[in-house]
Image (spheres, rainbow, N blue to C red):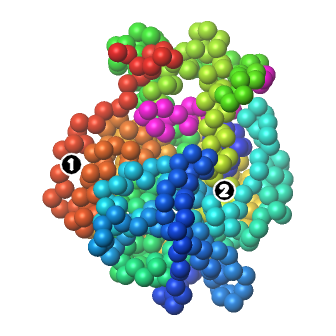
Amino acid sequence: MVPCRAMAGMRPVLAVALVLIASPASAKKLELEACRISDMRGLVSVAARCGKFAVPEDPGDPDGRQIELAVAVVPAIATRPKPDPLFLLAGGPGQGAIEGFVPGLGAFAGVHRERDLVMVDQRGTGGSNRLDCAMPDDALESEEIPPDELRKLAQECLSKLPGRPQFYTTSIAVRDLDAVRAALGYERINLFGASYGTRVAQHYARRYPERTRTITIDSVVPPALPLVPLIAIEAQRALQRVFERCAAEVQCNEHFPGIAEQFARVDARLRSGPMNVSLPDPVTGETSRIKVTRNHLVTMTRMLSYSARTASLMPLLIHEAATRGNYGPLAAQALMAGENLERMIAMGMHNSVMCSEDAPRFAGAADRAALEKTYIGPALYDGMKAICEIWPRGAVDSDFHDPIHSTVPALLLSGEFDPATPPEYGAAAAVGFERHLHLVIPGQGHGQTDLPCVQRLLRDFIDRGTVDGLDTACVGDIKPAPFFLSFSGTAP
C-alpha cells in the first residue's frame, strides 16, 4: 500500500456493511479527447485521450447527485491493437491513478505496444471529486497528536468535504470501474493493481470474472487482512532486515558498525526532546530553522524502507545523526516524504476506505505489547481508531473479506523486504486463484515494476494470458541496491 504517514497521529488510515449488487452494463458511452496527462508535480507528461464519466455518488439513488470520474487512455502503439486493454489501479488508498502512474508508464511499454493503457481516478482521488483533508503545517514538528485532537481534525475535515464519504469505498469503486469499461467498449480487460490497488483488482475479479482476462497484483493485500494493526509490526521487521543486511556486508559494516545500536541512540535522543537544525531550501537556498522530532525519524525510516534504492541511504543517515549529531539529512528526507504524501494521497477518501473496510476488524488483529516494541509504536493504530470513531462508515459488500475462489489467471508479485505487504500476504492471496504464479523478488521492497525482469514477465504473462511456461529465471539475478557509504554514493 502506498502508506499513510507513519508518525504518531499523522495520517491515520481509516470500515463495513451494506450489500451491493453487481451493476448492469452501462448504456452510456464515454467520448475521449486528445490531452496530455502529467505527474503530480507536472514534471512528466504523456499524450493520451481523456474524458469525464458521470456516475451517481450514491449508487442507490441513480437520479441523485452525480460526480465525474477522470479517465485517461494511452492508446496502443500498434495499428491493430489487441481488444483487451490493461487497466492500472493505484495505491493508497487515496492515490489518483493518472498522476500516480504517469511517471512509471515506461514499465508497461511492452504491454503498451499492443494494448491500450487505461487509468481511472478512483472516486475521491485525483480528478474524480477528490476528498482531501489538510493536516497542521507543523505536524512533523509536533509531539504525538492526542486522540481528542485527531477526532476534532477529522470532524473539521468532514465539514469541508465536497462529497458524502460513505459512498467512496472499494465496493462502489469496482462498480464505477466496470461502468467505465463498458462505456469505453471493452469486452474484457487485464488488471494491474499496486498496493491498495491489489485490493481493488481482487474485488473486481470477484465481482466481474467474465470481464477479467488476467490479473497482476504487486505488493499484495489479501482480502481477509485488516492492514492498520500490523503496519508497525511489518515496518519493524523490514527495518531489522536492513540492519542485518548492512551488518552482513563488509563495507557497510565497516562504515556503520553497530547500526542497530546507533538507531536506538538516535531514537532515545529524540524521545528526550527535539533538536534544532538549520536546513537550506532545495529551491531557493534560503536557510530555515526547524525542530527535528521523533516524527521525523519515524517518517524517514518508514518511507525510505519502502524501496530498495532509498533503503540503501538509511544506514548513512542514521550514522550521521548518531555519531556526528548531524540530523539535517534525516530531517530533509522526512520533510520530502511528508510533502510527497500530502500531494499524493486524498486523505478523506483514504479515511473512508479504511474506516469502512478495516477499522471494524481491528480488534484482536495485533498484540499491543508487540506494537509497543516497534519504532512506530501503537500511535498509528490508536490514531486510526480515534478518527474512525467519528468517520462515517460506508458500503462494503457482504463477501468483501471472504477468500476469493477465482479461475482468472493471476500473477502475484512480492518484495522480499516489503515493509507493508510482505511475501506472506502474497502467498495468502495466491491461494484464491486456481491458476496463479507468486514471485518473491529478492532484496526488494514495496513495488516491483521498475525492474526490467518484472517488466518482461508482465508483458509475457499478459500476451499469453496464462502463467504456464513463463520463464522466471531472471528473478534469481535480482539483487538489492548497494548501500550508500557516503553522500557521494555507493562503493566503487
Camera-nearest residue between 260 and 10:
10
Question: With 399 as the anchor, is 8 left or right in this view?
Answer: right
Residues at circles 1 and 2 in contact by the CB criterion of under 8 Å: no
Residue 285 vertical placement versus 472 (above, below): above
Q: Position of residue 388 (x, y in %)?
A: 71, 59
Q: Main secondary structure of the magenta part?
A: helix
- Crowding near pointer 2: few (<14 within 10 Å), some, many (20+)? many
Element on which disc 2 rests: loop
Q: Quadrant of residue 126?
A: bottom right
Q: Which residues are magenta?
A: 288-310
Residue 136 vertical placement versus 334 (above, below): below
In percent of the image, x 65 and y 81: which residue is there?
Answer: 56
Element on which disc 1 rests: loop
For label 1, the residue is 472
**Going from the N terminus, do you reach mark 1 or mark 2 first?**
2
The amino acid pointed to by label 2 is Ala
Question: With 475 as the anchor, is 333 left or right in this view?
Answer: right
Camera-nearest residue between 221 and 114:
114
Q: Position of residue 192 (x, y in %)?
A: 40, 61
Q: Position of residue 161 (x, y in %)?
A: 77, 64
Residue 446 vertical placement versus 132 (above, below): above
Camera-nearest residue between 477 and 403:
477
- Crowding near pointer 1: few (<14 within 10 Å), some, many (20+)? few
For label 2, the residue is 346
The amino acid pointed to by label 1 is Thr
In percent of the image, x 52 and y 53: which residue is there?
Answer: 45
Q: Quadrant of residue 394?
A: bottom right
